[in-house]
Image (tube, helix red, strand yellow):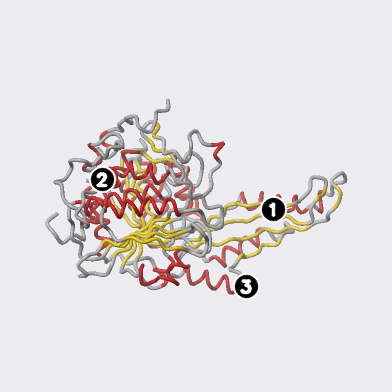
Amino acid sequence: MHSSPDETTRSLPRRAFLGGVGAAVVGAATAQGAGAFAGTSSPSSSLSGAAIPAADMDALDLLKRMLSFDTQNHGQGGNTRPHAEMLKAVWERAGVPVEIIDTPQPDNVHLIARIPGNGAEEPLLVLGHSDVVPVEEENWDVDPFAGDVVDGEIYGRGALDMKGANSAMISALLRHVDEGATFDRDIIVLTDCDEEAGDYGSRWLAKNHWDKIDAGAVLTEGGWFLAQSDKTTPMLITATRQDNVYFNLDLVATGTATHSSKPMPDDSAVVKVSRAISTLSEWEAPVHLTEVTREYFEAIADATSDRSFAKAIRLMLKAKSQPSRERAARLVVKLSDYPYLHRALLRTTHAFVIQEAGYKENVIPSEATTRVNCRGIPGGEKPREFVAAVRTLLRDRDVEVKVIGAEGESEEEALSRLDTTWATPPADLDTDLWRALSDASEATYEDTPFAPALFEAGTSLGPWRAKGVPGYGVYPYVLSNEQLIGMHGNNERIYVEALKQGSDYMYEVFGAFRTDEG
């Protein structure tokens, strides 16, 4: 049964979300400002001396507003200005200095807010993107830009990736500002554009406005908060300290162009590339465990309530040979409640994403191409090793395997660049930000284990990582596997109560940098 966004959502089991304020609140903020956190702290003034509206400190209310803006990025950026103007007004009501940074693409903008600290420590940058991937609206059960709440879940493009994280982080910071907090460092909140695609993302911003985003540590999207088999009880809280290596291959086949009334199956580009896809789809790259992924799987084995799953993980970690490691890994994936996530953390992955062939229905085309998006594990199999393996696999399929580099790059230049990314070490764990992430987990999720992890996808962290700045990632809400699959998919959604508890978690994280009595 569908409920309207303003109706009270059903409660999840109490064990599911154990945090502070958020766990005690049900329902969204009203238009009059009676927000979820109203009355939870003594009144105090903002930086400007004016009270912050309760709705701005309510993660659900703020997320609904974010979701109402269509910031789809179809490959060349999106229209992020209206979204940025809304957030700019939120920061201005709190008295926080904020500015919109225009890019050469009209209405595709960055937003930077800066909460001034006492300067005792280097600034902390909170990095979240405003653009979202396109929607197949006809395949959604609700309007992807309405922020509907249905059975305790809020739906919308970006609910998970990553407007939900933005709302949890921003609402938490505003609670501190409302309490008159003094931080030991500036906290910079960058809501960037072109994270999903485009030319004017964080790299462009770093090149043109580094002084505005220079920081000693960065917190962005990444680590998953996993649930036990009941889909809601927290099992493991993770923060990522490393991203997978992103690269693309093209499978290209050529054949005879001719009239479609006289097919030539043995010389058809489409048939050739289809056979190559079939072969590659049935193949997996070998399992590679690194220091980061070993620690992650060890933590899951200790945290899960599923004994068979834990046993399979330990068999995989103790395997002495590659064949036994592969067998155990298959069992791990089979038994996992998050099979696609865990498969992606074990090996280089390949996904078929774009196909191009033909231009007219009565013409058999002379060329067919399939783009294969790949993600490699840093410190595991090198991208160049994966490419060599794919070429060996497809050597009899009459297709060319092309490495897709940057414009003007040769294949060797592209592979050398990927070698450098592959060798980039994970972020140091001996930092105050990492300790804050860990301590906040204990405070918010009680006895739920906390562990570092590898992010199977990618982030905007490149410019800071290139300068040796430690960067970590969290999506601060407990997710089910079904919700995780909704990332970049249809019916993207997260639990309302998980979002509220995630805001409590972020409140604890930022509280580690307060110097006042709050």
Is 233 in front, or is 195?
Answer: 195
Q: Point out the image quarter for the N terminus.
A: top left
Locate residue 391 relative to residue 436 in the image: left or right: right
Name the amino acid, label 2.
Pro
Identify the residue at image location x=30%, y=55%. 92
* Circle 2 residues within 10 Å: few <14, some 14–19, many ≥20: some
Residue lying farthest to the top in this orientation: 1
Callout 3 secondary element: loop
For marks 1 and 2, the one nearer the N-term is: 2
Is 102 in front, or is 36?
Answer: 102
Identify the residue at image location x=34%, y=44%. 478
Q: Label 1, on which residue? A: 356
Identify the residue at image location x=47%, y=42%. 486
Q: Label 3, on which residue? A: 408
Identify the residue at image location x=66%, y=49%. 278
Residue 155 in picture, x, y percent from top left? 43, 38
> Is 348 rendered above or below residue 422?
above
Name the amino acid, label 1.
Glu
Is 444 in front, or is 206?
Answer: 206
Question: Which numbered disc covers residue 53?
Answer: 2
For marks 3 and 1, the one nearer the N-term is: 1
Question: Which numbered disc covers residue 30?
Answer: none
For marks 3 and 2, the one nearer the N-term is: 2
Locate residue 201 relative to residue 221 in the image: left or right: right
Residue 377 in picture, x, y percent from top left? 47, 61
